[in-house]
Image (spheres, rainbow, N blue to C red):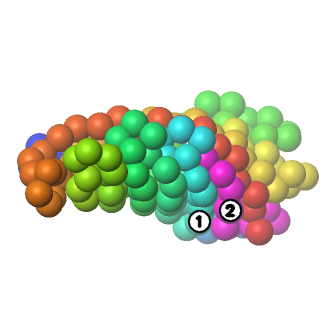
Amino acid sequence: MRTAVLATLALASLAGLAHADDGPPGDSDRQDKGVFGMGIVLGEPTGICAKLYLADDRALAAAVGSAFIGGGIQATADYLFHPYILQKRDAFVVPFYVGPGVRAIEYRGSESHPALGVRVVAGILFDFKNDVPLDAFMEAAVVVEEGFGKNGGGAGAAVNAGAGVRYYF
């Protein structure tokens, strides 16, 4: 668990050297689009998701939904950096993102128990510009967690992957 925390912190410090446009929301790529988006995510979890831009290259993202692999319900929260723009056009931008986060899950089934873990997420975002207040994303995350309760003692690892779309206000 300590190794995962150190790896997350190291990755976060490296990602802080962002090459994307820096500045407050509303500058350059996010003109008039809004800084808060809500939508759906399909995968692990499947449910609702949200994203709040703190700047053009930094955001908070969260999701809540069903956990199909482990069964139950899970919630994730991530601090995202957008360090590289893979493609930039008049109508859209395609940045890569990475960041540390946390996951809480309530496993259900024959071995029901809660677990809490840290995660490192990476993904690609298809961000429409001003004309369409939408973005679409695909991401994957590695999770290191600690299970609690009668049937869930001990550390474990998991992988989350999903794709979704958000509408910005």
Please, is residue 169 above or below residue 110 in the view?
A: below
Image quarter for residue 95? top right
Q: Earlier in the sequence, mark 1 or mark 2?
A: 2
The residue type indicated by label 2 comes to Gly
**Three-letter amino acid code of the residue under disc 1:** Leu
* Number of other residues with Cα within 10 Å of mark 1, as a class: few under 14, some 14 to 19, many 20 or more: some
Tell me which corner region of the image, top left, top right, bottom left or bottom right, holds residue 11: top left
Compared with 166, 124 (above or below) is above
Res. 52 mark: 1
- Quadrant of the image for the C terminus? bottom right
Q: Residues within 10 Å of mark 2 (few under 14, many from 20)?
A: many
Residue 93 appears in the figure: yes
Numbered label tally: 2
Which residue is pictured at 45% across the width and 40% down the height? 68
Figure quadrant of residue 164: top right
Kindly give the residue lying farthest to the right in the view shown. 131
Q: Are marks 1 and 2 in contact (CB under 8 Å)?
A: yes
What percent of the width, then of the height, locates residue 46?
A: 55, 46
The span picked out in magenta is: 28-41
Determine which of the numbered discs, if any, sits on residue 37 in the image: 2
Q: Secondary structure at mark 2?
A: strand
Q: Circle 1 — which element? A: strand
- Distance of mark 1 from mark 2, alpha carbons? 7 Å
* Residue appearing at x 51%, y 54% in the figure: 65
Residue 142 visible in the snapshot: no
Q: Is residue 100 above or below residue 136?
A: below
